[in-house]
Amino acid sequence: MLVAKVFRSTMAHAVIRAIDVSRARAQPGVYAVYTAEDIVGLIAKPFYGPAFHDQPILALGKVHHVGEPVAVVLAEDPHVAENALASIEVEYEPLPAVFDEIEAMNSKAVVHEVLKPAGTFPDLKHLSGKKNTNIALDFHLLRGDPQKAFKQADHVFEHYFKTQPVLHLPLEPFATVAVPTHTGLTLHTASQSPSFVRIEIARLLGWPENRVQVKVPYLGGGFGAKLYIKTEALASACALLAQRAVKLALSMEEQFYVITKHATTLRIKSAVTKEGQITARECEVWWNGGAFADIGPRVTQKSGFTAAGPYDIENVQIDSYALYTNLPPAGALRGFGIPQLVWAYESHTDMMARALKIDPLQMRRKNVLREGRPQATGTLMRDAALVPVLERLAQLMHWDEPFDHGSGTWRRGRGMAIGFKASIAPTTSMAIVVINADGSCQLQSSTVDMGQGSDTAMAQIVCEVLDIDMGVIKVVHPDTDVTPYDMATLGSRSTYHMGHAVKRAAEHARDQLAAMAVEFKLTLNEVSIADLFKRKYGMQAGNVVGVGSFIPAYTSPDAQGQTLQATPFWMIGATGVELEVDTETGQFRITQMINLVDVGNPINPEIVKTQISGAAIMQMGFTLSEKMDFDEGQVTNASLADYKIPGIRDLPQFMHNEAVSAFEQSGPFGAKGVGESGTFGVSPAIANAIDDAVGVRLTDLPLTAEAIFRGMRIHAGQPLQED
Amino acid sequence: MKAFEWEQPRDWGEAISMLDPRDLTVRVMAGGTALMLMMKSGVFQPTRLISLQGLGQEAGAIVQEAQGGIRIGALCSLTALGQSSAVATTAPVIIRTLKTLSNVRVRNVATLGGHLAHADPHMDLPPVMMALGATVKTVGARSSRTLTMSELYRGYYETALEPDELICEIVIPSQVGRSAVYLKCSTRAADDWPTLGVAVNVKCDGDVIEKARIVVSAATEKPIELVAAQTLLEGHSISPSRLNDCAELALAQAPLVSDARGTASYKKELLRVYLKRAIQIALKGTIS
Ligand SMILES: Cc1cc2nc3c(=O)[nH]c(=O)nc-3n(C[C@H](O)[C@H](O)[C@H](O)COP(=O)(O)OP(=O)(O)OC[C@H]3O[C@@H](n4cnc5c(N)ncnc54)[C@H](O)[C@@H]3O)c2cc1C
């Protein structure tokens, strides 16, 4: 097997004048060195992406961000391949670059001269981008008459917020092995979307789907990083050019240049009555999408639906922009843009409550969307336990009891925040349940288990329907030769979508078994599955194959962003935080964190709890310590030593994670997704608690001790020198 | 990574003879924990590594001296250091410091000599050793010498060691009547490199401070002894105003630098607070 090592761009935006790989090719042990020129010989249009076909397999003509793959070296010895990278020479002609999302709105630097919509997903069909700009997608929503409401308002509040670039950082980085076979190509890959990989690789090669086989083992984490095409296209091209098996496994450091979470700038403005009723809201969101759109346009649109927050507001305007910049591309990261939005609207809620001298809980109670009410898109809230989640949070935090704000140099504070999310729709899942003659059973599904426990949850669904033991079920891992289509394991969609497909497949199998029993004038209660097969086939032989598929109803929003079917279900998450600030330094510790979610009926309550805590801790890292630092597009802290994810000693002293009692009428066994809900409220709950403790309002993430300290000094009239 | 030669000398003399003072790609490797990181990131590409692991147990031994001091062989692992009863009785501050120093896997192989020679200003034991008044003994091609910690550290990742000179031993003088404290202040994740390190060592007669040593690290390019602040404390008992004056002198003397962990002006505030806390804790230690 050959190992591939990638030569990456050192420029953020530049024309490639020349690439000289001759010295690298001449190194002993180097099997091949490829550039875009070689790729084009195999794939005439070597561009991929789920929203736009904007990402070249290797840079073609110009580079769009530091770290973009420009050339690749193949060798049997990884050290030989790595060393050869140093002798590749590229001549660049620098172009003006744009890094900031606000500047990208009007910048002279344009990241892509031509925009190529992919047209893959039905909800992104309208996508075209705006020529000669950096706008990949702009989503607009208008409900009621916000301008009139602002004129008549008792109070108007307007605030700006920012979130920083961060990344997924699964402890297993991206890895693909591509093997040319006599029928085509087999990929063993760390992917959350095997079906998409097959379709996209087949499209690139102009092959039918069945010539590409994609196999996915357990993943060492994903969090949205391993969606769509990551290492697969380059590994495939290398394997086909070399006609050898090729392994492309990135280092931890390279992850910083593959996919990130959108940095954002958010503006939010509300009209409020004296009593605290919100009558109008305007939201503007600028998403820093980096050099390639990846799934950013969908993040922009779907999260745009709920940018105004879980509040019953008559007049709403939302403008959301997906922007290209010369940073590494941004995609979906656990929450699909929602944590950025909740950060803004729930900080804003507390800032208004504070100004109006209304208790933050009362402010939320007064405005929260109640069951059956239309949300900003016009879609009604159904089976959305916003009120139960909020009330349970208040109860667990003893919100109505007096709170000790501390004394001396330690000040205590508490804060809460609640957010919600529309599921990604419409997406399809298929499943196959095979029953063997001895009563054992395989579930074939392309849902990827990356630690979230989907294998267990899906097996439970099959057991429940067939009334069999967990022990007799084998969950077959994604293998596109065997497991049927699934859109992807993303956006908390699997329990609901794949759960439905699996349930239907199991029901289909059960119905066939029941029909078999009827042939012998029996019911399924009277005969074991093994006996039934013996009666039918005279020996241990035969199978029953049950198939199931699911796609929810969805209606695309109209020009005003209005639709009655924005989502098949609503996800809800809230967080309450108590913390202590050392007023001498600004350092603080979270003494209590309570995370509450609505997951409908939890299929596996223990897994649900770990999903909630995992999501909350991950978001806590994005709130307190994680931040990608850039210098001219280059990441200056691209390692785990310098980019700090939380460790065990950073956890809150006390943590409580709970799913409120709820039921999703449209879900399998009343269930809906849980992977992301724990992230929603974390950042603003912490910021609100800091404000409660020391009166400092932070509007930019991450929330550092230094920022708090500087805020306290400004209050004291002794601002700290900037340097 | 490129191929390199691997040598395993039996004694210090042999190790030194394998070094090449004109070729900085030839280096000794002790635990290798710092070296491997530099090699992985491509900052250091060796042509020859000289492992010190074959030098024998004595090279890492801890010896309690009759006068109350201890001598520690350069190859003593951080784990062995943390488990030593001689260290625990002589300088318990080292044991406390090791609790949050890296992790058990690193401590099992990292050596005290490698730790002190690496000269990363964020490391924890250099300021502690400086506050304890420790010295290092070196062996070289031409001569052997003894260096104080202030003499050892020249700057950012820079020591006074010659290219063919190695640390063979660390000597900690008797700490009778002294009380030492090290405060590690991190401002991002708890296990991040410190934003600021402060080490204080005091010797008291009643409530009068006879001797004081104050060292700042991590926020500076190398660990630095804050002499003026020390002098202010010596010969006096502590009062709130003296403590304040001491902190102000320390701030004036410490060349703090901005980095991703904080601006210099913020680190100044941290130093003011942490220095006072460290002195107060150290003084409490002399009473108990
Ligand atoms: C994950 C991780 C976390 C860490 N966290 C911390 C922490 O919290 N606090 C902290 O203080 N440190 C921390 N460190 C640093 C660690 O303490 C050092 O890497 C270690 O002490 C170095 O010792 P070593 O024996 O492995 O040195 P090596 O890597 O072998 O050598 C380091 C350098 O010293 C030279 N050298 C080695 N021995 C000698 C000698 N006898 N004489 C002269 N030169 C010599 C080598 O040539 C090399 O240049 C961490 C390291 C890692 C990998």
Image (spheres, helix red, strand yellow):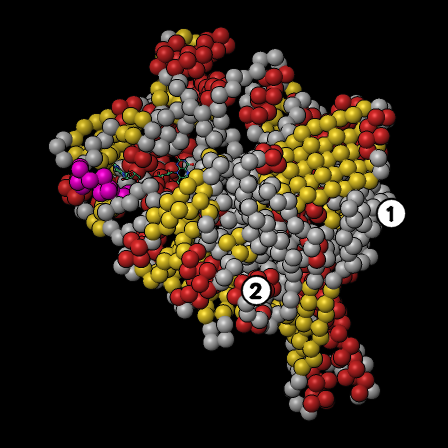
Above or below, A486 against A322 in this view is below
| x and y percentages locating residue A99 in the rendered image | 53, 36
Q: Please tell me whether residue B20 belongs to the stretch shown in magenta.
A: yes
* Distance from Cα at disc 1 to Cα at disc 2: 43 Å
Q: Which mark is residue B258?
A: none
- Tell me which residue sits at (24%, 34%) in the image: B167
Q: Is residue A134 left or right of residue A402?
A: left
Query: Which residue in the rendered view is the most extreme toward the bottom?
Result: A538
Q: Is residue A272 left or right of residue A688?
A: right
Give the secondary structure at mark 1: loop
| x and y percentages locating residue A416 in the rendered image | 72, 34
Q: Please tell me whether residue A456 belongs to the stretch shown in magenta.
A: no
Q: Is residue B18 left or right of residue A547?
A: left
- Tell me which residue sits at (63%, 16%) in the image: A715
Check disc 1: other Cα within 10 Å, few if <14, some if 14-19, many if 20+.
few
Indicate the quadrant where residue B104 lies: top left
Disc 1 target residue: A372
Q: Main secondary structure of the magenta part?
A: loop
* Ligand 1 image position (quadrant): top left
- Tell me which residue sits at (73%, 27%) in the image: A158
Disc 2 target residue: A203
Q: Is residue B90 visible?
A: no
| x and y percentages locating residue A349 in the rendered image | 75, 31
Q: Is residue A90 left or right of residue A266?
A: left
Amino acid carrying mark 2 in the image? Arg
Give the mark toward the camera: 1 or 2: 2
Give the secondary structure at mark 2: helix
The residue segment tinted magenta is B19-31
Amino acid carrying mark 1 in the image? Gly
Viewport quadrant of the N terminus of chain A = bottom left
- Disc nearer the start of the sequence (1/2): 2
